[in-house]
Amino acid sequence: QVKQATNQIVMNCADIDIITASYAPEGDEEVHATGFNYQNEDEKVTLSFPSTLQKGTGTLKIDFVGELNDKMKGFYRSKYTTPTGDTRYAAVTQFEATDARRAFPCWDEPAIKATFDISLVVPKDRVALSNMNVIDRKPYPDDENLVEVKFARTPVMSTYLVAFVVGEYDFVEARSLDGVLVRVYTPVGKAEQGKFALEVAAKTLPFYKDYFNVPYPLPKIDLIAIADFAAGAMENWGLVTYRETALLIDPKNSCSSSRQWVALVVGHELAHQWFGNLVTMEWWTHLWLNEGFASWIEYLCVDHCFPEYDIWTQFVSADYTRAQELDALDNSHPIEVSVGHPSEVDEIFDAISYSKGASVIRMLHDYIGDEDFRKGMNLYLTKFQQKNAATEDLWESLEKASGKPIAAVMNTWTKQMGFPLIYVEAEQQEDDKVLKLVQKKFCASGPYTGEDFPMWMVPISICTSDDPTCAKMQILMDKPELTLVLKDIRPDQWVKLNLGTVGFYRTQYSPDMLESLIPAIKDLSLPPVDRLGLQNDLFSLARAGIISTVEVLKVMEAFVNEPNYTVWSDLSCNLGILSTLLSHTDFYEEIQVFVKDVFSPIGERLGWDPKPGEGHLDALLRGLVLGKLGKAGHKATLEEARRRFKDHVEGKHVLSADLRSPVYVTILKHGDSTTLDTMLKLHKQADMQEEKNRIERVLGAISQPELIQKVLTFALSEEVRPQDTVSVIGGVAGGSKQGRKAAWKFVRDNWEELYNRYQGGFLISRLIKLTVDGFANDKMAAEVKAFFESHPAPSAERTVQQCCENILLNAAWLKRDAENIHQYFLQRKAPPAMV
Ligand code: BES
Ligand code: ZN
């Protein structure tokens, strides 16, 4: 539609050559464009016409040539090997955020929606898929080896959700309870590996239909595994694409964490079919609506399909704490952030949009209650279906459904960066406890000293030892300070804030309140998610220098009786951070002793072999603990790992999938060049991408300098898929102190190739973070900063700033606490003093 007479049409277009373009006003003769002016920087083209196009509707026709590129964006080729060993290519698309313009000229913005009629001319022995079902397939007149496949018209939709795939695939199919045809496409010969995802998808579609009370609008949905794939998965409407490792499960060779990952990713992408595809964000500023929401509801969905995963506790260690870690930096950003250039859009696919977004939705859901929340979601999805919406629109619907001041509360969380630290102290007054709460912005660098006083509206819940699972009081804290009276509480009862670790804030207890909580960790009377949250808060307070690290080490020792996988996982992660920090000291070995002491009791309780009646979480816990002990050099674990690995390699006794990562990491950490060669051979032989990735991630554990170089060279070799190079280099950087230095040098030396490979994009940010985050002196911060000043990576600018900030924080932490930590370790080892 021409809305205003003009002789120019501007549209998005990148790496495309236009051959001819013409405009035909309805019922009138077509006019050929005479000039194509490409503005490469802006990814736009201006078509100039010799005469004025008058107001009215018409048809714009463009003949163009594009490139089937190698960059995993736009329309690109993905390499695969046939069962007989031939190398072939599939042609696939990845358009989000701004790459549909690389496949065809278009108005490539989420709010410019259109219907799409897609036809593909493809070799007749290939599978051709697109968003919609096939409505016609006929021989192509000019070439008997080709067919023309025509797909049904799509609903009105955004360009970033358009997709097509041409390649060789097998599939399994099912019909979901709500009548949608679901197929999972796998590499040829691996259809069986699609069954797990198929089951999850067939259960998930009716779950969402019921949750939103809105049906899935397309007749079919395909889920397809793509060999070369930059992201984890992409929610193209009706044709969801996945990395192989996010979709394929082999009953024998897949580990429990892969199963869980596949379930989460399927749950995430299918949620987008409603939240994102049917109702789309107005502009990328509201990307978090898409990603934060999907990252929340994927857990709801997995909890529905697999209650035994206890997935909500895992949410806290995977998303909530990760978000808080990033959001405590001065270089964080608000959830809603203004973006313009494509590189700025790429940049916000980060833990703020995903994990903080998901965390504030979880807090909101808890504040509203499930029933009203669902009512509001339905209002929102119905009102804006096939249209676009902004953050305020969601608040309005939820406000209508709940009668609560949603916009006022949520604006404090999405429009300003950061989150509060709530300081609490209690005073016994006869039968009551009087609590005093103060909120201040939480900063990774220590007490907030800024001049303005950012404030949040914080839903606070409080429980006591009388019933640790039930809120004794709930209140919305809407000012800097609050005094509360808890009635009828004995002096010996403890009081805890943030029941369920749902509120997006950290808590600092007065020393005596904290002391009273420690026994509740030991005797497990505090629920797992609260034990986790308490430990994590303390760890971050220590990192920020608000309390001493030694104090946290003591608390960690109170977890002797801990049975919960997720609690261990979070604790292990924090000990890993501390271990990385102390790798810069000369008492690194001492923290390994501490790790061994903390993990030995649970390691002994678990043993190596599953016991009857064990489940998913036991398998995860065993892998975690054995890996931790093995890496730290726990003698018995190391010996057993070596024995089992030998049997595995000799084919005497194949390692169960859940034991492979811990065994591999253990033998590599304490291995030599023969070990590395054996691992590389296993890598070559592996048929499943999951196994290849498993090996790639742990190679960096090797410690000899020349072997580290070998791993780095391997990272860029043909043996490693381009998207996986990042985790190999990251593994080296995270594996040892020498590895960190070597990886950083390697990234600098190979910068051009790496940057080119990912063309900016979010993988480059991930690479930078994994490589430099562990440094801990001011000089390194300056070096990193200088390097990226002379080698700019626009989509990673903020990441670089965050990394430099982290390096300085590490340096300060080391200076502040290293000596005390060392003393504590020595004193733990010393024989008890004679009295
Ligand atoms: N929409 C994203 C895919 C995406 C990511 C496109 C980055 C462009 C840039 C998709 O829904 C997504 O979020 N995928 C996640 C996996 C998910 C389970 C968290 C991913 O790719 O990491
Ligand atoms: Zn997503």
Image (spheres, rainbow, N blue to C red):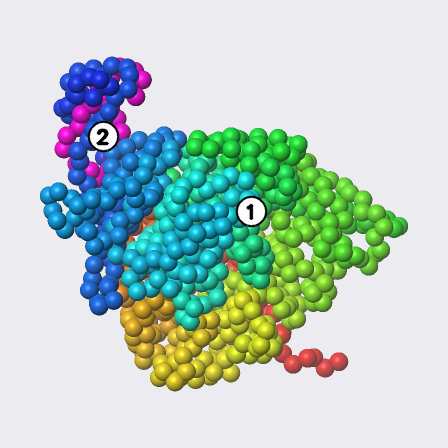
- Above or below: residue 258 compared with residue 648: above
Left or right: residue 435 versus residue 20 is right
Say what amino acid the circle numbered 2 marks. Answer: Val
- Residue under pointer 1: 359
Q: Residue furthest left?
A: 142
- Tag 2, which secondary structure? strand
Q: Is mark 1 within 8 Å of ligand 1?
A: no
**Would residue 283 be visible to someone looking at this image?**
yes
Image coords of residue 603 (percent x, y): 56, 76
Q: Badge 1: how crowded within 10 Å, few (<14), some, or many (20+)?
A: many
Q: Are marks 1 and 2 in contact (CB under 8 Å)?
A: no
The boundaries of the magenta stretch are 1-23
Image coords of residue 774 (percent x, y): 44, 59
Give yes or no for residue 12 being in the magenta stretch.
Answer: yes
Image coords of residue 467 (percent x, y): 76, 56
Image quadrant in which the N terminus is located:
top left
- Tag 1, which secondary structure? helix
- Above or below: residue 422 compared with residue 388: below
> Sequence order check: which comes first, mark 1 or mark 2?
2
Which of these two is toward me, 193 or 261?
193
- Which residue shows up at 20% across the image and 23% down it? 23
Query: Which numbered circle lies on residue 45?
Result: 2
Q: Quadrant of residue 736 in the image?
A: bottom left
Say what amino acid the circle numbered 1 marks. Answer: Ser
Q: Badge 2: how crowded within 10 Å, few (<14), some, or many (20+)?
A: many
- Which residue shows up at 45% across the image and 75% down it? 656
